[in-house]
Image: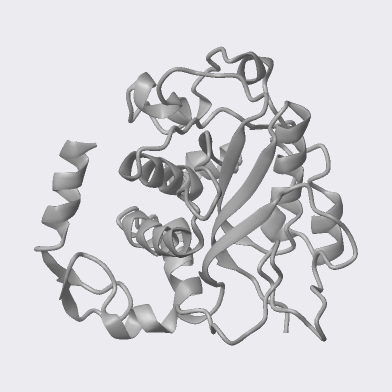
């Protein structure tokens, strides 16, 4: 962590084009003007669980039911510059944007005690929403997995990319479905492998599909532990209906996790 901290300090002295406007700024990140475009309106009342803006005092996404996840921390809304950054990272394969997006999510987590504090302990594990195999092969990396790895390493948290897996990797991607189909499709779509429940090591699917870019210990994290009573943070890039996070949380809690929260880059807001 000390070595990584030195690297992070060096970034602050390097001038690079802002991903939003192209203006050269120190820190290899967003300029002040573009960063302000991502700010969430602090005067807007939002759901305390899923962070969607309230409508007449009620959350339109989870107001009528109790989600399996305990809370969600969002970096920005999925619109404007935020949408452009995520799409550039995912579909233009701009891996360098992972650091910019992770920085923004880290700011939101620090403001809400996501790394510990405010009477809440830090998560025992950080894990990403598993990507489709086809997307991994096409893109070469998973943005949620890369953000999860970066946040965990920077803040001294344990992470594993194999806590949750897709039960059916041939299922249609969420982006191709309408709202009603999104809410139905993920039910039972994710499982926790028996090895993850017991604390054993699972096969490194992500590393193998990405060409073995990382050491085994770097991918699955340090000493493995069972999920019983664990606090788990699930990283995702875009939250639309919350159905995917709901399915992942159900799988984790069925395996024994006590607390599941979403760390999400962007939240889709229904107007």
Quadrant that contains the N terminus = top left
Residue drawn at 48 percent across, 65 percent down: 87
**Residue 25 position within the rendered picture, expressed as x and y whole percent measured from the top left:** 17, 75
Asked whether residue 187 is in view, the answer is yes
Which of these two is toward me, 182 or 271?
Answer: 271
Q: Which residue is drawn at 16% across and 37% down?
A: 3
Give residue 267's position: percent from left, percent from top. Answer: 61, 68
Q: Is residue 92 visible?
A: no
Give percent across and percent down for residue 52.
69, 72
Q: Which of 44 and 96 is in front in this view?
A: 44
Could you tell me which quadrant the C terminus lies in? bottom right
Residue at x-position 26% and y-position 67%: 29
Residue 82 drawn above or below residue 205: below
Residue 66 x/y as whole percent: 84, 55
Image check: 54 left or right of 209? right
Q: Which residue lies furthest to the front in this view?
A: 119
Measuring 52% from the left and 34% from the top, which residue is drawn there? 125
213 displayed left or right of 178: left
Report which quarter residue 214 is drawn in: top left
């Amino acid at each position: 962590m000390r070595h990584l901290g030195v690297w992070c300090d060096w970034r602050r002295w390097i001038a690079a084009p802002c991903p939003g406007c192209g203006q050269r700024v120190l820190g290899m990140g967003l300029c002040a003007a573009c960063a302000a475009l991502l700010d969430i309106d602090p005067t807007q009342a939002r759901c305390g669980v899923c962070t969607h803006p309230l409508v007449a005092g009620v959350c339109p996404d989870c107001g009528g039911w109790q989600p399996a996840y305990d809370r969600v921390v969002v970096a920005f809304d999925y619109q404007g510059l935020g949408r452009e950054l995520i799409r550039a990272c995912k579909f233009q394969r701009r891996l360098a944007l992972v650091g910019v997006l992770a920085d923004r999510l880290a700011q939101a987590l620090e403001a809400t005690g996501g790394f510990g504090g405010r009477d809440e302990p830090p998560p025992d594990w950080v894990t990403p929403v598993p990507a489709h195999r086809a997307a991994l092969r096409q893109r070469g990396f998973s943005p949620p997995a890369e953000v999860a790895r970066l946040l965990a390493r920077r803040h001294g948290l344990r992470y594993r990319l194999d806590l949750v897996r897709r039960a059916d990797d041939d299922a249609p991607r969420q982006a191709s479905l309408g709202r009603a189909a999104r809410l139905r499709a993920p039910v039972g779509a994710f499982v926790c492998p028996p090895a993850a429940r017991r604390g054993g090591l699972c096969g490194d699917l992500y590393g193998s599909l990405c060409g073995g870019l990382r050491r085994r210990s770097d991918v699955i994290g340090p000493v493995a532990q069972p999920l019983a009573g664990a606090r788990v943070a699930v990283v995702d890039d875009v939250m639309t209906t919350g159905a995917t996070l709901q399915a992942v949380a159900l799988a984790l809690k069925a395996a024994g996790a006590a607390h599941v929260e979403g760390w999400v880059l962007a939240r889709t807001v229904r107007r």
